[in-house]
Amino acid sequence: MPMNVVYRGSADLPEILPVFPLAGALLLPRGQMPLNIFEPRYLAMIDDSLRDGHRLIGMIQPDPAHPGPDDKPHLFKIGCVGRITQIAESGDGRYLLQLTGIARFRLEEELKVATAYRQCRVTYQPFTADFIARKGEDEVDRKTLLEALTAFLKANNLKTDWDGIESAPNEALVNALAMMSPYGAAEKQALLEAPDLKTRAEILVAMTEIDLAKNTSGGETPLQ
């Protein structure tokens, strides 16, 4: 498998993926996720992924509404496959790596495997638009999104790199804010499963307004 692979469609991706269940972790197409890998089963997963040349990992959340055995929780049906685009050895047995999101997938079947990590048969067919970079950017209400971000930062006494935000294309902005958002597993899953970029931005704004309203005296949402 060559370096710097370009994925043009679902046919370029394998049907069987190693999956990394991680609550609260949201990977989106073309988004970048840092990971600190230290559990032996996931170290083995990374080794196998590098060995087979695909360098692909399926990020998916455990489903808290349907608990399974302690060592094998049930999974949400939708995840996102990422490619290992950076990796470093920590010197103490860990891997420090970066995944770059490619496309979302729907879990079809979990396989019975000999590996300590889980593997699933997946389909990318519901998410063919994920392979088109910046699709739907013009439909995003950037002004409302930035107003929500400004209010959130102010309410939490936070600062950000406004130069970077203002220069970011809508897709990169929406997906980065969604991935960094401080919300729970259900909210992160809703952001992941949004049918398009416009809807994801609207969900993110709505979540932010609800969060701000909870912390505003009088119960009024400051963005209305």
Image (cartoon, rainbow, N blue to C red):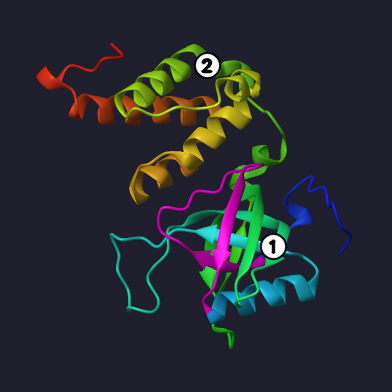
Q: Quadrant of the C terminus?
A: top left
Say which residue appears at 58% left-offset and 44% top-offset: 28
Is label 2 in a helix, a strand or a loop? Answer: helix
Q: In the picture shown, does residue 181 fall above or below 110?
A: above
Amino acid tagged 1: Leu
Amino acid tagged 2: Arg
State the CA–CA distance, disc 1 to disc 2: 32 Å
Magenta stretch holds residue 110? no
Q: Quadrant of the N terminus?
A: bottom right
Question: Residue 193: horizontal and vertical position, in percent?
Answer: 47, 43
Q: Is residue 107 left or right of residue 6?
A: left
In the picture of the structure, the residue carrying the numbered disc 1 is: 56
In the picture of the structure, the residue carrying the numbered disc 2 is: 142
Question: Residue 80: horizontal and vertical position, in percent?
Answer: 58, 52
Going from N to C along the chain, the mark reached first, 1 or 2, is 1
Q: Is residue 49 left or right of residue 104?
A: right
Work out which residue is located at the far front of the displayed protein and give it.
Answer: 91
- Circle 1: is it few (<14), some (14-19), or many (20+) Cα within 10 Å? many
- Name the one closer to the observer, 104 or 164: 164
* Quarter holding residue 163: top right
Q: In the picture shown, does residue 98 fall above or below 43?
A: above
Find the magenta span and give its range.
16-39
